[in-house]
Image: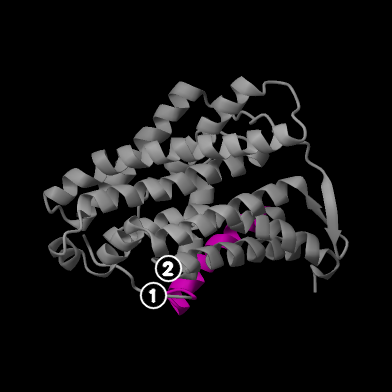
Amino acid sequence: MCFTQNFWNLFISGIANGLVYALIALGYTLVYGVLQLINFAHSEVFMSGGFASYFILNALIGSSQPHGLASVGFVVLGIVAGATGGGIVAFLLERVAYRPLRRRNAPRLAFLISAIGASYFMYNLAGKEFGRDAVSIPSPFTNGTVFTVFGAQVQTYYIVIAVATLVMLVLLDRVVAGTRLGKGIRAVAQDAQTASLMGVNIDRVISQTFVLGGLLGGAAGFLFGLNAGVVYTMGFTPSLKAFTAAVLGGIGNIRGAVLGGLVLGVAENLGIACTQSSWRDVIAFGILVLVLLIRPTGILGERLGRSA
């Protein structure tokens, strides 16, 4: 086939892209689980994480080139900064754009309009305050080939993405499966009214779920920005692809979001090998249309939530 000679290079870079999509997709999935609504402002949460990490690392690294343990420390700092920025924006978003509507029992359309309005507000505010041109996050490490797999080069950047993402996914799984917050999320996702009667603070659980999704999305903003730079428009396309990944895996299913991200990342890479790089987005969103037509519930489709 057209990608036979370059299969492993395409596969490895596709996995790296897919892991970033998965982190963003988890924000959509977590919020959908407790609200049964899509947070269309999640793209700006992702963008906020990218800018937060840029400002921190630009101030600390500047034009220098860290090595060794310093590189590891700056990567961790960048992830923490991005996650913190995304978490703060997600918290404010829930308080301003969602909670007042929930308390007024507003129709679902109002939530959608509010999310889109908040998204455009943050999008234009970032463009005004941070400039319209892309800026590069100072690299905390020297990117190069670490080892090869069947002749395919595995770069430092791919390893950073893989390690960081896997650590965050394991932590998320532990939070959802074994903490009080996780029990609250699962209870609200299954039946919000019954959970409320059992003493679960619905507002607190929803707010914390937004923050949890924001932490992951903001960290993804840093990992994405390391390679592509950060700009006020950076959230649009990756977040739409992450939404595609969430739908592909099964919206509301945490493991499905991860699986959907990996499948989408590899599929679009292999697809452009048979066409042109300009077809990347066409392939990704074509997958979304096909999934909605053939299997709307996704690969691991599971309806987790009711409206809170």
Q: Is residue 241 visible?
A: no
Q: Looking at the image, is 64 positioned above or below residue 96?
A: above
Q: Amino acid at mark 1?
A: Glu
- Badge 2, how many Cα within 10 Å: few under 14, some, many 20+? many
Point out the stretch of residues depicted in magenta: 278-299
Q: Quadrant of the N terminus?
A: bottom right
Is the C-beta separation of discs 1 and 2 under 8 Å?
yes
Q: Helix or strand or loop: what does disc 1 sit on? A: loop
Q: Is residue 138 found left or right of 305 in the rendered image?
A: right
Which residue corresponds to mark 1? Answer: 302
Which residue corresponds to mark 2? Answer: 253
Q: Quadrant of the C terminus?
A: bottom left
Q: Amino acid at mark 2?
A: Asn
Q: Main secondary structure of the magenta part?
A: helix
Instruction: Please give the name of the residue rendered at 28% of the width and 52% of the height, measured from the top-left corner.
Output: 206
Q: Is residue 78 found left or right of 149 in the rendered image?
A: left
- Badge 1, how many Cα within 10 Å: few under 14, some, many 20+? some
Residue 252 lies in quadrant: bottom left
Image location (x, y in percent) of residue 143: 78, 40
